[in-house]
Amino acid sequence: MRLMRIGEPGHETPAALASHPDTPADERSYVDLADVVDEFDERWFGSGGLDHLAPIVAERIAAGTVHPLRDQRIGAPIARPHQIICIGLNYSDHAAESGMPVPDEPILFTKSPNTMVGPNDNVIMPRGATKLDWEVELGIVIGRRTSYLKSREQAADAIAGYVLVNDVSERAFQLERGGQWLKGKSAETFNPTGPWLATPDELEVMNLGMSLDVNDERRQTGSTSTMVFDPLTIVHYVSQFMVLEPGDLINTGTPPGVGLGMTPPTYLQIGDTMRLSIDGLGTQHQRVVAPR
């Protein structure tokens, strides 16, 4: 399944993508699930909702009970998570462009959960920002409450699915203001997510192409195959340090090509656009707008 939330902010309703993920955006259709799911949130993931929902989605697609997506707003495919955990420097070539060594263990940091917005919503420039940067990333959505996992197999069982994420960053806040990285990661709108959550059976997760364009110029090209720590390793590792809740999101790091690593470093300005995609997980498009 590919799960979605459709509607205006605060009024999204659960749905599932009915058309093939490679279908042009203006030709896509969806299955309305508002009559069987209240919300894709911690309670729903924790109740084993995926197993219950799969036959309903398949039956409605087979019966042709679908609706055109057209220009409806797409929200993040999960409601606000309990926490967003991020993995730093998880691609060796990104570590090199950042001037940092490849870590021996995953680097963990947090991002405020209220950074999550829809995949095509505006990104708001924070007040005082000077070094706004982009990061296309694979996100892992946790499917059950878990901690102290003993194996990769247990880690696989804890994953509900995967999403496309833009881990927007303000590098001056992150690296020049002291303290932890979350300062440069937690401004409003800094985590566009979606357009859908793909369950693990839909993807060959360690062989997904990734890309990001700024103002229609390619900045990032990569593949999940070059991760230092793969998703199962990450989930197993994180579970040794904290309890993971259903619906939690883990951003798994970015390939090379961020603004920080360019010569000279190049950052986003008001009016710039970003377009990013991961195979099987769709495409996002954002515009940078002025501070509130």
Image (tube, rainbow, N blue to C red):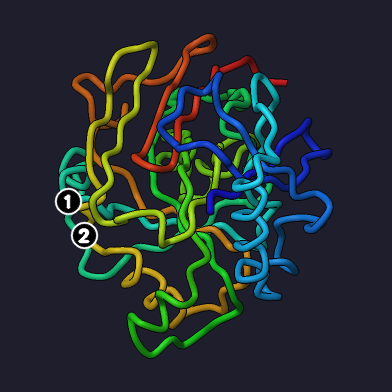
- Using the rendered view, name the quadrant where residue 8 is placed: top right
Mark 1: few/some/many CA within 10 Å (<14, 14-19, 20+): some
**N-term-proximal mark, 2 vs 1:** 1
Residue at mark 2 to residue at mark 1: CA–CA distance: 7 Å
Q: Residue at x 38, y 78 (%)?
A: 236
The residue most toward the front is: 63
Mark linked to residue 228: 2
From the viewer's perspective, is 56 left or right of 217? right
Q: Position of residue 246 (x, y in %)?
A: 63, 69
Marks 2 and 1: CB-CB under 8 Å?
yes
- Which residue type carries mark 1? Ser
User: Element under label 1?
Assistant: helix
Q: Position of residue 273 (x, y in %)?
A: 47, 15
Determine which residue is flagged by label 1.
92
Q: Position of residue 228 (x, y in %)?
A: 21, 60
- Residue 100 lies, with reference to residue 271, above or below; the image says below
